[in-house]
Image (cartoon, helix red, strand yellow):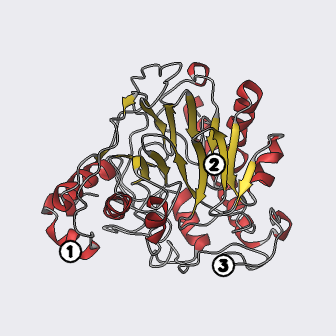
Amino acid sequence: MSVRSIAKGIGTALLWVVIVLCLLITIVPRFLDARYYSGPPGGHFDGQRFFNPDGEQDDLAGTGGNRGSFLLRYLTRSDGRPAWPDHVPVHAIAPPARVDGQAMTATWVGHATVLVQTQGLSILTDPVWSRTSGPLRVGPARVAEPGIAFEKLPKIDVVLISHDHYDHLDLETLQRLWKRDHPLIVTSLGNDSVIAQAGVPSHALDWGGRISVKPNVEVVVTRNHHWGSRWFTDRNRALWSSFVVRLPGGNVFFAGDTGPGDLTWADSAASYGPVRLALIPIGAFRFVPGQMVSGSHIGPIDAAEVYRRLGASTGIGIHWGTFHLSAEAYDTPPRLLAAVNRVAGLRGFGTVALGNPSVIPPYVARTRPAPIDRIEIVGRLPAAARALP
């Protein structure tokens, strides 16, 4: 037997071990539950777990089975997903060491990780530099290296953590950042308990909570529509959120990881002042062929409506092209977003190259187009856009 055959056999055996362990996690382990937050019941907390006040939705409905069978098909890649490239080249350009005043630069690092520099501050969203996304370093692997090598990051002043999923809350990366820079880490309720597992302090706030960074700069924790878990059984023990960074010259909005829900959370974010830059997810929205909307993730159509509701001047589509999490093709999110923008009459919302610093223009108020109706937009899309895998 050849060395290659032996290696392939070992790899297959390890995969099945992982599958069995993951299935056991969904069935057995009450001991893996954890209580990350204690507090009185309220509008989105029942005393035990958090919930979406605009109703719950399940991405797996209609996928042909329960969570266990869905996970099995996902791990064995028998769910019919289009193949992704194994590796995507990244031609990174080092970000500036510092950006002062109202000048602003944004660099997409990958997935939901973005470096925003302005007012002499370097702000990181959901920083993930690990190679894989999942517990025990088992999970989807990156197809693209981080757009900025960790060693080339400028000193980080502020870190925003939207929720506790592994592709957004990476303890190893947070530990490295804390040891190097001691940034202000802001998150939502309960996630501070998870972050503390790495020996890292953070500030956990409820929706509507705010914290000052320096004069005229503050972070506001804002609502979105999602869920949280590290081990399945600890579902919704910690809160999820978006963020508004209030700044002279226009705010930065980071949507975190979100489904549409009632979409009024975007209106609430806009109430904090003009949005100069909006970081909005556009990928991991498809779990069955042809799907345009899911419960936990927004795709390009809903992302465009979020951008419209925010009244944002510039938007960058994130949460795509790094980890293979769902059933759309690698480049479907940016291609579909471009088509939706043309149909909806939106300007200023697109995607950027990994690792290439983008100068964000000053805030310019725009006349808001009509609300985006999903069914109408889909009907107006060119056939080629509707047929994207």
Residue at x 25% of width, y 53% of height: 366
Label 1 secondary element: helix
Location of residue 322 with respect to 258 vertically, above or below: above
Task: Name the secondary structure under disc 3.
Answer: loop
Find residue 376 and name its label: 1
User: Any mark on residue 161, and which?
Assistant: 2
- Of residues 26 and 345, the one drawn nearer to the viewer in this rendering: 345
User: In the image, what residue type sits under mark 1?
Assistant: Glu
Numbered badge on residue 118: none
Residue 2 seen in the figure: no
Label disc, if present, on residue 43 of the rendered structure: 3
Q: Earlier in the sequence, mark 2 or mark 1?
A: 2
Examine the image and state in which quarter residue 209 appears: bottom right
Tell me if residue 153 can be seen. yes
Q: Identify which residue, 283 or 360, lies in the foreground.
A: 360
The amino acid type of the residue labelled 3 equals Gly
Quarter of the image for the C terminus: give it. bottom left
Q: Residues within 10 Å of mark 1 (few under 14, many from 20)?
A: few
Is 82 situated left or right of 234 in this image? left
Q: Position of residue 260 (x, y in %)?
A: 44, 69
Q: Please state if 344 lies on the left or on the right of 211 as rendered.
A: left
| Secondary structure of the residue carrying numbered label 2 | loop
Q: Residue at x 23, y 55 (%)?
A: 346
Neighbours of disc 2 within 10 Å: few (<14), some (14-19), many (20+):
many
The mark nearer the N terminus, 1 or 3, is 3
Q: Amino acid at mark 2?
A: Ile
